[in-house]
Structure formats: C-alpha cells, structure tokens
Image (cartoon, helix red, strand yellow):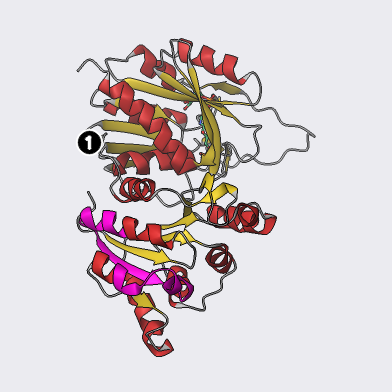
C-alpha cells in the first residue's frame, strides 16, 4: 500500500518508544522506505540497532553525528521524505515544534519539512491535560500538523487515563489514508462551481458578495485527488487555483449559467458551492455613472436565473448537490431549497457560526437528504469537510443507476 513512499519515523524519549518498533515493522511490510530518527532520550528506551534492523536503513540520532553533519543531512532528509510521523511524541518535542525550537536532528528536520507531519502524543494524563500542552497542540493543529490522539488506558506510571499512545495499527492506517488517497471517484466527471459572481453596474462598479472560493476550491482539489475528472467553474477569486482537469473563469451569473449548462449533460455530478447573485442591475451603464447633486440614487435590480433550479429541472441521472448559506432557520431554509431545486443532497451552511462560511479556512455544515435524514459534519478545515462531503457524493454515485 505504501510502495515508493518515503516515511521518516521520529522516536522521542517516552516509554511508548518500544511501540515504534511495531510501527516501523508495519510500514516496512507495506513496502515504504522507512528512516528512523531518534532523539538522545529515545536511545535510552530502545537500542538504535533495533530500528536499524527493522527499517533496513541507518538510524539517525544526534549522538553519532557532528553538528556539521546533521546541519546538511536534515535538509536532504526533509526534502526526500513524503511524510514524517513522530511516535511517541513527548510533551517536550511537541513544545519544541510549537515554539520553533530546533536543537537536535529531529526538531531541525521537522522545521525544514514541507510534507505532512503526524504526531502521536504519549505522556502521563496530567501532562496531557496541562493547559500549556493543550495550547501547543491547538497551535500546531492550526498550522496543519496532523495528530493521532492518545487513548485511555493504563499508563507506565500506574495511572489510568488519557495519554496512551495510539495503537501502531491506527498510525499505519492514518499514514496510508494520508499518502494513498482513496481513488473512489476515479473516472467520475464532477463539475464544481465556486466563488462569487460579479454583477456590473457600470464599467467601474459592480455588485458581489464575500465568497472567497475556498470551499469550492477545496472540493475541486480533493475530488481531483480522489480520481475525479473535475471541471471548476469559478467566479473571480484571489486564492490559488487547484490543479484540476478544466478551469472556467466567469464573472456574472449569466456567464456561470452558460458555462455550467453546456457541460451539464457530460457530468456524473454537479456541486454548486458558488455564491451566485440572485439579482443584477436592470441596466448596465455604458459609461461611468456621474455623481448627481441628489442626495440618493436609485438602482433597479432584476432577477438573475437560478442556475441550480435550472439544473434540477434538466437533471438526467446526474447527482445534483447544492449549498444553502443561511443566517436563520438553517434546516428549514435548506430543506425547502433542496425540494424546490430537485437536489440529491444539500449542504446547509450556518453563516452565523464562528469560523464558518465566507472566506474562512474552516467551516461547519449539515448535510440534508431528500429522505429527511441529516448528518452534522464537525467543525474543521474546509479540505477535511470537502472530503466528508465527497464521501457522501461517492456513495450517491455508487448508488446511481448507470
Ligand atoms: O467561498 P467561501 O468563502 O469558501 O465561502 C463558502 C460559501 C459560504 C460560499 C459556501 O459554503 C456556500 O454556502 N455556498 C452557497 C452560497 C449561496 O449562494 O447559497 P444560497 O443559499 O444563496 O444558494 C443556494 C444554492 O443555489 C447554492 O448552491 C447556489 O450555488 C445556488 N444558486 C443560488 C442562486 C442562483 N441564482 N443560482 C444558483 O445556482
């Protein structure tokens, strides 16, 4: 499962270091190239030769190499690896990484890494529940570090509680899911809309909204990673465009409608994450409207086409997914849109939730189905939420009558 993947296993000085032996063995059996980096404290728990035998690679500890050596080696190791997992991760290494301390090979290599870094904390319950440690965990999570949380159990110190390192089998599973994303959407053609639309008033003014495109772009990126042939129809956004099959840039709702409808027939699924303007100015002035002496100015707006409603009307075996951006009556409003627009799934977005909705890197949504059942997706990064939404769409596609 991990053939061709290069994984660095960092081992720090905790009694759970012995469990890292099983992890290294498992990863080697998955045909990953495993290199072990031990802290000095770890070498008093497990002999480096053990890891050398299990990984069939030299083990790196700061003990044996001069500073000159690891000043260079840590960069090259960081550059050639696909992921780093630190198991066990003591309070000490967590504190060092969270505070930018790089005073040994492992902490220096982590600082030089640009690949996913997974931490498997292991320590006494009181230490784990210490607010400083918890602050370090939250800080690292906000920077995108991955965690496989410790479980409850009998600890080396005789206490029972949270702090036991996660089982090596769980750590192996986490790495497989991280490095070998499932290809459950292989070959599926999915069109995703993202970002705002822009309704022009005159050559210098327009009406728009706060959508940044992050939610739609996350869906496009994760769907492509899972093997889908993704078409991204995007309004004007300022974030990097994900590498997908086709990107179509539009400005107005009418342009988005055209771009979506001419591609609809070929799609297996359509996800409408874009924030589409319901109205546009009745007239677009050819020249910049000059300021008048009057204290106010009237702007007549006319209704825009409802793209999702048009898609619902023309649906022919596609899986059709919409979003509902609400500030009140979330479930009722979302359910009514789902029915009116003939959707297979609607993602209800409560914009009043802190960290949810427009322009945040995070979101919190509830999935509603036509049969009345719903599923709350926990608050989290938009990419993680996109993955959960795609899990449901993958299930709907499996159930599709081909
Ligand atoms: O882009 P981000 O900054 O990451 O923000 C994400 C988001 C908040 C924009 C996104 O999560 C979201 O909620 N998108 C839907 C926004 C929206 O227009 O919701 P709505 O309730 O107004 O529209 C309901 C559905 O109909 C949406 O799928 C929308 O794409 C679609 N619609 C709406 C109006 C219209 N004229 N045509 C449409 O297709």
Position of residue 244 measured from the top left corner of the image (x, y, whole percent):
30, 45
Quadrant position of residue 217:
top left
Neighbor class of circle 1 (other Cα within 10 Å; few <14, some 14-19, many 20+) is some
Report helix, strand or loop for mark 1.
loop
> Quick one: 235 or 390, which is closer to the camera?
390
Q: How many marks?
A: 1
Q: Residue at x 27, y 58 (%)?
A: 25
- As for residue 26 lying within the magenta part, the answer is yes
Q: Say above or below: 254 vs 317.
A: below
Q: Residue at x 80, y 34 (%)?
A: 295
Position of residue 212 measured from the top left corner of the image (x, y, whole percent):
52, 43
Query: As drawn, is 318 to the left or to the right of 65?
Result: left
Quadrant position of residue 136:
bottom right
Q: Is residue 141 visible?
A: yes
Position of residue 269 measured from the top left corner of the image (x, y, whole percent):
31, 26
Q: Say above or below: 342 vs 78.
A: above
> Quick one: 254 or 326, which is closer to the camera?
326
> Quick one: 362 or 247, which is closer to the camera?
362
Mark 1 sits near ligand 1, with its Cβ under 8 Å away: no
Query: Where are the magenta residues, as a range?
Result: 24-50
User: Which residue does the numbered mark 1 point to in the structure image?
Assistant: 186
Q: Residue at x 26, y 64 (%)?
A: 54
């Amino acid at each position: 499962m991990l053939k061709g993947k290069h994984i660095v296993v960092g081992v720090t000085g905790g009694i759970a270091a012995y469990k890292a032996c099983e992890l290294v063995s498992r990863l080697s059996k998955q045909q990953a190239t495993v290199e072990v980096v031990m802290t000095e404290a770890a070498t008093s728990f497990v002999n480096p030769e053990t890891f050398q035998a299990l990984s069939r690679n030299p083990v790196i500890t700061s003990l044996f190499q001069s500073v000159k050596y690891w000043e260079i080696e840590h960069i090259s190791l960081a550059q050639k690896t696909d992921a780093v997992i630190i198991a066990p991760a003591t309070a000490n290494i967590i504190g060092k990484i969270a505070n930018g301390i790089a005073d040994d090979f492992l902490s220096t290599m982590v600082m030089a890494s640009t690949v996913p870094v997974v931490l498997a904390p292991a320590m006494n319950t009181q230490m784990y529940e210490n607010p400083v440690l918890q602050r370090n965990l939250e800080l690292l999570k906000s920077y995108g570090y991955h965690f496989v949380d410790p479980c409850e159990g009998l600890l080396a110190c005789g206490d029972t509680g949270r702090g036991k390192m996660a089982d090596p089998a769980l750590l192996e599973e986490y790495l497989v899911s991280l490095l070998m994303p499932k290809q459950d959407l292989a070959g599926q053609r999915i069109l995703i809309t993202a970002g705002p639309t822009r309704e022009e008033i005159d050559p210098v003014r327009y009406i728009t909204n706060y959508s940044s495109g992050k939610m739609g772009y996350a869906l496009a990126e994760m769907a492509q990673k899972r093997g889908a042939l993704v078409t991204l129809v995007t309004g004007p956004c300022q974030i990097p465009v994900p590498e997908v099959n086709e990107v179509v840039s539009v400005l107005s709702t009418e342009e988005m409608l055209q771009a979506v409808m001419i591609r609809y027939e070929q799609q297996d699924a359509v996800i409408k994450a874009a924030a589409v303007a319901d109205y546009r100015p009745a007239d677009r002035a050819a020249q910049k409207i000059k300021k008048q002496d009057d204290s106010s100015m009237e702007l007549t707006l006319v209704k825009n086409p409802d793209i999702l409603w048009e898609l619902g009307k023309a649906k022919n075996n596609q899986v059709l997914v919409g979003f509902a951006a609400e500030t009140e009556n979330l479930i009722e409003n979302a359910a009514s849109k789902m029915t009116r627009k003939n959707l297979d799934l609607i993602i209800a977005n409560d914009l009043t939730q802190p960290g949810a909705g427009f322009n945040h890197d995070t979101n919190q949504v509830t999935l509603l189905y036509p049969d009345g059942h719903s599923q709350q997706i926990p608050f989290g990064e938009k990419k993680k939420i996109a993955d959960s939404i795609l899990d449901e769409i993958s299930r709907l596609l499996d159930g599709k009558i081909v």
